[in-house]
Image (cartoon, rainbow, N blue to C red):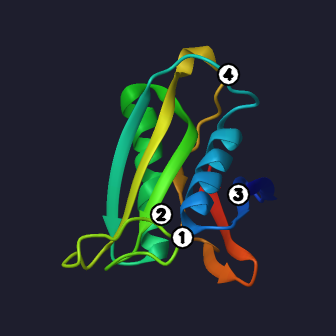
């Protein structure tokens, strides 16, 4: 999985690729972390978990990233070192365990390391946007482009 930060007028964008949708969500979240500061300490900060649901992939990615920004604001931490498991309604073709068969929603179960904000020189990312958001399967895996308001 990879990500790159892209200039976007007064905002910042993350462009990411990965072999699975779960890895793509983690790569975009890692891009959000990179957009927030120049470097992240290799140690410190306990892991925390989040779970989000939505009716579609794009909405799930949006809600997940929005939740990470919320966690930053409430916990006063920079979420880093992301791990994600994305499950579509009824199961997954990526090898993840099937979701609840009755669940009509996409699910992301994720964790991140909570790096205290006072340990980094963080730039405030105000919000994730739907502006120009792209999330698609490609021949060689998955691709995402997400713009953040700074």
Which circle's residue, 4 or 3, is located before the other in the chain?
A: 3
Residue named by callout 4: 42
Q: Mark 4: few, some, or many residues within 10 Å (few <14, many ≥20)?
A: few
Q: Mark 1: few, some, or many residues within 10 Å (few <14, many ≥20)?
A: some
Looking at the image, residue 95 lies above or below residue 6:
below
- SS at mark 1? loop
Q: Mark 3: few, some, or many residues within 10 Å (few <14, many ≥20)?
A: many
Residue named by callout 3: 14
Q: Residue at x 49, y 53 (%)?
A: 84
Q: Residue at x 40, y 42 (%)?
A: 70
Which circle's residue, 4 or 1, is located before the other in the chain?
A: 4
Visible in this render: residue 126?
no
Question: Where residue 121 sits in the image (x, y, percent)?
Answer: 67, 22
Horizontally, residue 75 falls left or right of residue 141, namely left
Residue toward you, 91 or 47:
91
Q: Residue at x 44, y 53 (%)?
A: 66
Looking at the image, residue 123 lies above or below residue 58:
above
């Amino acid at each position: 999985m990879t990500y790159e930060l892209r200039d976007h007028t007064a905002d910042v964008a993350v462009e990411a690729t990965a072999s699975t949708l779960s890895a793509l969500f983690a790569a975009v979240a890692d891009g959000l972390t990179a957009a927030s500061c120049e470097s992240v300490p290799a140690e410190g900060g306990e892991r925390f978990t989040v779970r989000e649901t939505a009716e579609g992939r794009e909405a799930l990615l949006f809600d997940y990233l929005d939740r990470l920004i919320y966690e930053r604001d409430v916990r006063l931490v920079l979420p880093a070192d992301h791990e994600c498991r994305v499950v579509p309604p009824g199961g997954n073709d990526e090898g993840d365990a099937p979701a609840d068969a009755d669940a009509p929603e996409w699910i992301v179960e994720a964790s991140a390391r909570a790096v205290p904000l006072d340990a980094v020189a963080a730039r405030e990312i105000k919000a994730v946007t739907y502006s120009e958001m792209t999330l698609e399967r490609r021949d060689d895996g998955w691709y995402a482009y997400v713009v953040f308001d700074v």
